[in-house]
Image (cartoon, rainbow, N blue to C red):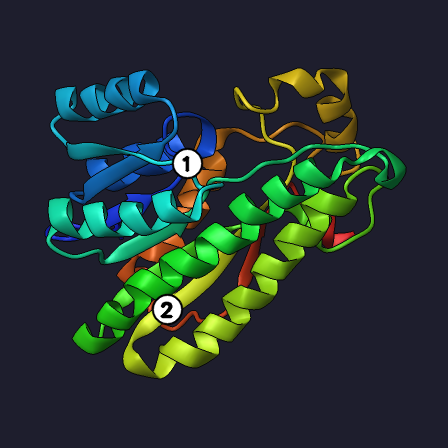
Amino acid sequence: MTADFTGRTALVTGSTSGIGREVARQLATRGAHVLVSGRDAERGAATVEAIRSSGGKADFIQADLADPASVQQLAVRAIELGGQVDILVNNAGLFPFAPTAEVPQQEFDEVYAVNVRAPFFLVQALAPAMAERGNGAIVNVTTMVATFGLAGAAVYGSSKAALQLLTKTWAAEFGAAGVRVNAVSPGPTRTEGTASMGSSLDGLATTTPLNRVGKPEEVAAGIVFLASDTAAQIHGVVLPVDGGRLAV
């Protein structure tokens, strides 16, 4: 059964490239009005144009998730453009890798601002209205390294581990009101953002049973599933889309 999002508005953060862009495309293909969000207006305009040229409905909202005021304005603009937000996909994230001893405080603060604080306050701004309507879906994008220790991933992994716990907490808070909150945990995935990882990305992939790097569309399919009515009975889960890494 193909998910149908006709008449629904979806806000997808970090959707001008990579996994987020593919999520926006798949949601729009299935009828959603997609609000594309990111820092780069040029890439945002290109993403919106690609969706519209394929018959979908999309608008772009520029936002810097490291800035609390920009996060609040993003929620306001999303409601203005969409009328309401039915689906929130917290996809945007920073993923630096460095030994703990070499992490600057500013980098630590920025990662937690984007990966934890921004999703928290977007949910605070948008989930209560979903609860009042008795319907809504929130999908957070985490990572497989939120679940096991990987040298160099202390800041990134711990920030996403926090988001995984928030996923379960929000499911407990909002589930009875009809708002489903779940997460997808990707493994190594080839995107513009991971291009700088070079061969280390392929090295991570060799630790998975699938033994290859994932594709954005494969991760996006899991996110779209969790946002859909097909997943109506699924609350508070973290779905691994990681080539089986967490299964071994």
Q: Position of residue 206 (x, y in %)?
A: 78, 30
> Who's the residue at 28% across and 72% down the image?
128
Q: Position of residue 87 (x, y in %)?
A: 28, 55
Above or below 73: residue 164: below
The quarter of the picture where residue 242 lies is top right
Q: Which mark is residue 143?
A: none
Name the mark nearer the viewer: 1 or 2: 1
Spatial CA distance of label 1 from label 2 is: 26 Å
Q: Tell me: 188 left or right of 114.
A: right
Q: Residues within 10 Å of mark 1 (few under 14, many from 20)?
A: some
Helix, strand or loop for disc 1: loop
Above or below 68: residue 138: below
> Who's the residue at 45% across and 33% down the image?
19
Q: Which mark is residue 64?
A: 1
The quarter of the picture where residue 209 lies is top right
**Is tag 1's residue or tag 2's residue first in the polypeptide sequence?**
1
Q: Tell me: 30 left or right of 231.
A: left
Residue reaching furthest bottom? Answer: 176
Mark 1 residue type:
Asp
> Label 2 belongs to which residue?
180
Above or below 93: residue 184: below
> Who's the residue at 47% across and 79% down the image?
172
Mark 2 residue type:
Arg
